[in-house]
Amino acid sequence: MVLDISSLPLAFQFTSPGPILVKIGPLTIRWYGLLIATAVLVGVSLSQYLAKRRNINPELLSDLSIWLVIGAIPAARLYYVLFEWAEYAKRPEKIIAIWEGGIAIHGAIIGGTIAALIFAKLKRVSFWQLADLVAPSLVLGQAIGRWGNFFNSEAFGSPTNLPWKLYIPPERRPSGLESFEYFHPTFLYESLWDLMVFALLLNLFFRSVSGKLRLKVGTLIMVYLTAYSTGRFWIEGLRTDSLMLGPLRIAQVVSLTGILAGLAGLAWLYFRKRPLPDVVASTD
């Protein structure tokens, strides 16, 4: 990141140092992989801590994390490759090159949800309880992971000359926009939005376990779905590299579906005749 004050006071020009953190002989450590690993480790630790506050065995979340990684990362890659199949069909050896970027969070959510449902069924525990404990970790992980797009010079927006503009090297610029140097740092927008959603979820969580707020089990994951999808819908409209299905931006379609599903889920939790139990306040 480079501080550029040549044209405007307090203007920030974001410039990626490149995707590789360090290379030692045949060993290459990339920022993208490091950030994903960091997001997983932080997420597992956080979900275990939250489990303790809800009087749930934290080891359950440790076991679940393995299932989530196995379900989410391949699904995230598969989702991306399917919508970019025209390119990957020409270079099939790149399909497994996940370290170069190209994973879709919506694919990860789908894969992770399937894995969590199977895990909950096998362990005979509440899926909604697990989802609530994972939701804050999930959105925090997304906030961390988005910086992988920064180092890879990808997932940026349309050209801009705003003070917080993002420099994109010529080889990474979209066709037709080669003459532009600066673009919207949509990775930053989404990372900041995710942090705000994370703060909202933590606030709700701690108010509920302290007994200051009555929440139904399942509320946090529905709030996550609604809040994250709202921000993603707007931010996706700025991007130049959206996955497309005809004239439609896939992420916007999925985000709109997420907003409606989240709102419907909250209504279901709070207005159904046989509501799910309240979150039990912590005894700490």
Image (tube, rainbow, N blue to C red):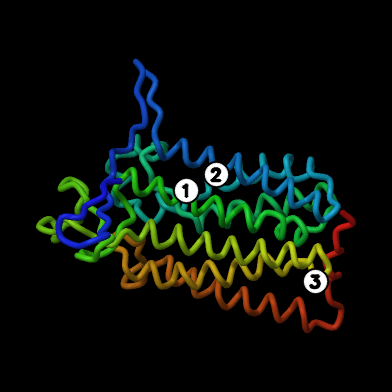
Quick one: SS at disc 2? helix
Evaluate if marks 1 and 2 touch, with contact meaning CB atoms under 8 Å apart.
yes
Compute the Cα span from label 3 to label 1: 33 Å
Residue 53 locus on image (x, y percent): 80, 53
| Furthest residue in direction top, as rendered | 25
Which kind of residue does numbered mark 2 sit on? Ala
Quick one: SS at disc 3? loop
Residue at 50% x, 41% y is 36
Which sits earlier in the primary sequence, circle 1 or circle 2?
Answer: 2
Count residues near mark 1 (Cα–Cα under 10 Å), then give few for <14, some for 14-19, many for 20+.
many
State whether residue 40 is above or below residue 213.
Answer: above
The numbered disc on residue 39 is: 2
Compute the Cα span from label 1 to label 2: 7 Å
Answer with left or right where residue 130 lies relative to residue 236.
right
Answer with left or right where residue 27 lies relative to residue 284.
left
Q: How many labels does the image show?
A: 3
Which residue position holds label 3? 212
Evaluate if marks 3 and 1 touch, with contact meaning CB atoms under 8 Å apart.
no
Which kind of residue does numbered mark 3 sit on? Lys
Compute the Cα span from label 3 to label 2: 30 Å
Which residue position holds label 1? 145
Which kind of residue does numbered mark 1 sit on? Gly
Residue 149 locus on image (x, y percent): 37, 49
Q: Quadrant of residue 198?
A: bottom right
